[in-house]
Image (tube, rainbow, N blue to C red):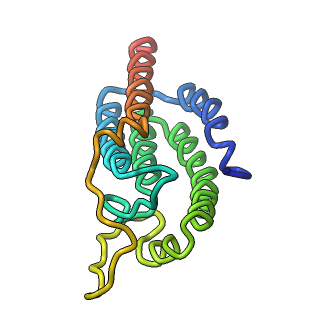
């Protein structure tokens, strides 16, 4: 169970979203550029979701071989895209402040859960894969086994993890920015 600041992440997102929309001054070019970044983040998240079997096995293949948190890395890309799409330094600052306030606590909380659940396997994984910023995986020393068999991307896992909700949410934000742009002229 997530504790502390991490458990308030979703609830705090609603007033943050309202403030973001209020501060946004969207324009066509900025929405397009922001959408491109946000869709890149969605692609990262979608790829990661297709490798994740929650509460059943430690994900270490696919994008999990590059970063221990590809879902949050993709979310940061999405956040950057939405910040750009807003065409407002203040709205962008709200997005950055939200991510800076909640993501480090969430990462620590989730890693503590993984340490409890997977023990030595997680510690070995954490020793070779960076927490957030991706890096190409290092080759395994000869003769050494990895902690889990390589998994392939699964569209069924993508659907099971309901990752399409991130896509729908991002499209809704972009649509609302377009509505605001048209309404305010």
In front: 27, or 68? 68
**Residue appearing at x 31%, y 26% in the figure:** 28
Q: Residue at x 40, y 27 (%)?
A: 168
Q: Position of residue 46 (x, y in %)?
A: 34, 43
Left or right: where 125 falls relative to 111 = left
Residue in the image at 57% along x and 71% along y? 119
Task: Say which of 171 and 125 sits in front.
Answer: 125
* Res. 171 image quadrant: top left
Residue 76 located left or right of residue 139? right
Along the line of sight, which residue is nearer the eye, 35 or 57? 57
Q: What percent of the width, then of the height, locates residue 93?
A: 55, 44
Residue 129 vs 81, above or below: the answer is below
Residue 105 higher or lower than 65, as above or below: above
The quadrant in which the C terminus is found is top left
Instruction: Identify the residue shown where x is 50% and y is 70%.
Output: 122
Position of 20 relative to 2 (above/below):
above
Q: Is residue 32 left or right of residue 1?
A: left
Q: Residue furthest right?
A: 4
């Amino acid at each position: 169970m997530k504790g502390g600041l991490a458990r308030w992440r979703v609830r705090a997102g609603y007033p943050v979203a309202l403030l973001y929309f209020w501060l946004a001054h969207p324009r066509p070019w900025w929405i397009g550029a922001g959408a491109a970044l946000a869709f890149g983040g969605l692609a990262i998240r979608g790829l990661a979701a297709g490798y994740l079997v929650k509460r059943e096995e430690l994900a270490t293949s696919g994008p999990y071989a590059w970063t221990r948190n590809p879902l949050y890395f993709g979310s940061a890309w999405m956040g950057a895209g939405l910040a750009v799409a807003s065409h407002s330094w203040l709205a962008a600052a709200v997005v950055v402040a939200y991510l800076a306030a909640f993501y480090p606590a969430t990462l620590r909380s989730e890693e503590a859960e993984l340490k409890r659940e997977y023990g030595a396997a997680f510690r070995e994984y954490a020793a070779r894969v960076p927490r957030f910023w991706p890096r190409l995986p290092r080759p395994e020393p000869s003769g050494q086994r990895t902690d889990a068999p390589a998994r392939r991307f699964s569209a069924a896992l993508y659907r099971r993890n309901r990752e399409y909700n991130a896509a729908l949410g991002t499209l809704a934000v972009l649509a609302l920015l377009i509505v605001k742009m048209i309404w305010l002229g």
